[in-house]
Image (spheres, rainbow, N blue to C red):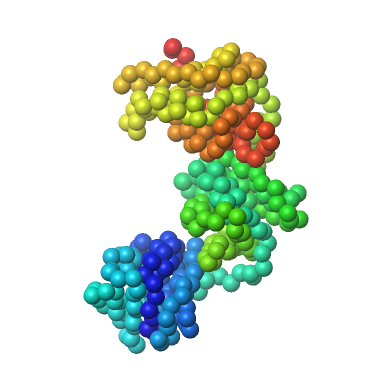
């Protein structure tokens, strides 16, 4: 193989495909990127058996061929190598020489035959979404994906598609995040995408108005985003019945500026650390929300004006869970719906049902 390509194109392609490689693996090929040189193109593939990312860049191909190179080493070299172009040569023993400017590196590679084959998924588009819409849906729900494997199915987000609407749901046992968007489709299906995959997809979504194409099979999903082809396994299992988990009634409704409340929670959280954990006490009075926190470092009090209807209520929250939900709201005003001190609090928009965040309260001592 012998190719010459633009350095900036190669750096971007390698850094993105490297996200689908293993940092350490007993199978060396899984730590590498498959490079395949064809006429006028260099194809790059990263695949860790769960997530695969494929892309192509323009290249001057002097000799076709393919090999696998360490993703980390390749990226470190091409980021630092001088010059605007990079050349990569490899011989029959898979020894690769990388040149840029006056710099030259020779590193060992592996045969392409050692690289695992990606799952074959039909390439018709099951679902088409604007990239900006898909990115906001992922970003507004990813924070609530479970990070422990106590219930592996909740380490991903549920896509629930029916009635010309796609609903994305994440849940981790302490909170729930839901984002809903209308679509032009009569598709009806449900599938669960790993949180890691969605995190990488979010990084690739850039062109707001450009379209992203999703193809779903029984065990895999493919995302086509710009020049990238991303394939991921789906998670199997019974996802939480999210409709049953969401309270249907509320005794207290609060209309409040989300930025003002977020800043008040952040200020009150200054006394909380990993070592000094304490809930934030949130008290809804007639026309304000009062926040209190007490740790061995001291006491904090803050308050935010708001519009309240219904009963007054006082409850405690994990400050991080509350902040994550408020920041994900991404709008000026939100509505807090509460059905008692020990019932989950709903955070929803003033109008419509585009998002819903559910935060479970924590018990607090009534000592102040």
Residue pictured at 30% horizontal, 81% vertical? 95
What is the residue that sits farthest to the left in this orientation? 102
Looking at the image, can residue 5 be seen?
yes
Where does the C terminus fall, quadrant-wise? top left
Residue pictured at 37% horizontal, 83% vertical? 2
In this picture, residue 194 sits left or right of residue 351: left
Residue pictured at 61% horizontal, 41% vertical? 178
Q: Position of residue 18 (x, y in %)?
A: 41, 64
Relative to the observer, which residue lies in front, 296 or 131?
A: 131
Question: Where is residue 100, by image quadrant?
Answer: bottom left
Q: Is residue 219 above or below residue 272?
A: below
Relative to the observer, which residue lies in front, 256 or 292?
A: 256
Q: Is residue 19 above or below residue 283?
A: below
Q: How many marks?
A: 0
Q: Position of residue 23 (x, y in %)?
A: 36, 61
Where does the N terminus fall, quadrant-wise? bottom left
Q: Is residue 177 above or below residue 1?
A: above
Q: Position of residue 243 (x, y in %)?
A: 67, 39
Relative to the observer, which residue lies in front, 300 or 360?
A: 300
Residue pictured at 42% horizontal, 17% vertical? 301
In this picture, residue 33 sits left or right of residue 233: left
Q: Position of residue 129 (x, y in %)?
A: 64, 55
Looking at the image, can residue 174 be seen?
no
């Amino acid at each position: 193989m012998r190719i010459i390509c633009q350095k900036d194109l190669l750096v971007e392609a390698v850094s993105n495909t490297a996200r689908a490689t293993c940092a350490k693996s007993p199978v060396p090929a899984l730590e590498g990127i498959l490079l395949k040189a064809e006429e006028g193109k260099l194809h790059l593939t990263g695949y860790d058996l769960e997530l695969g990312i494929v892309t192509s860049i323009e290249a001057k191909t002097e000799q076709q061929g393919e090999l696998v190179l360490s993703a980390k080493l390749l990226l470190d070299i091409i980021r630092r190598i001088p010059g605007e172009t990079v050349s990569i040569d490899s011989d029959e023993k898979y020894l690769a020489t990388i040149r840029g400017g006056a710099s030259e590196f020779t590193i060992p590679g592996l045969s392409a035959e050692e690289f695992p084959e990606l799952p074959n998924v039909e390439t018709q588009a099951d679902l088409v979404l604007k990239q900006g819409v898909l990115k906001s849906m992922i970003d507004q729900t990813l924070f609530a994906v479970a990070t422990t494997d106590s219930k592996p199915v909740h380490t991903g987000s549920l896509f629930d598609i029916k009635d010309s609407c796609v609903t994305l749901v994440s849940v981790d046992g302490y909170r729930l995040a839901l984002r809903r968007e209308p679509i032009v489709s009569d598709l009806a299906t449900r599938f669960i995408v790993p949180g890691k995959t969605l995190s990488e997809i979010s990084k690739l979504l850039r062109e707001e108005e450009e379209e992203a194409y999703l193809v779903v099979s029984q065990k895999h999903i493919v995302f086509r985003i710009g020049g990238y082809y991303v394939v991921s396994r789906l998670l199997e299992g019974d996802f939480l019945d999210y409709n049953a988990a969401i309270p249907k009634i509320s005794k207290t409704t609060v209309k409040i500026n989300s930025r003002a409340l977020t800043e008040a929670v952040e200020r009150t959280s200054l006394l909380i650390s990993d070592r000094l954990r304490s809930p934030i006490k949130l008290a809804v009075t007639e026309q304000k929300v009062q926040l209190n926190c007490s740790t061995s470092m001291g006491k904090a009090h803050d308050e935010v004006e708001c519009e309240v209807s219904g009963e007054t209520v006082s409850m405690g929250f994990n400050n991080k869970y509350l902040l994550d939900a408020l920041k994900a709201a991404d709008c000026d005003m939100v509505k807090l719906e509460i059905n008692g001190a020990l019932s989950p609090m709903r955070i929803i928009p003033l109008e419509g049902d585009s998002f819903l965040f559910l935060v479970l309260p924590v018990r607090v001592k009534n000592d102040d």
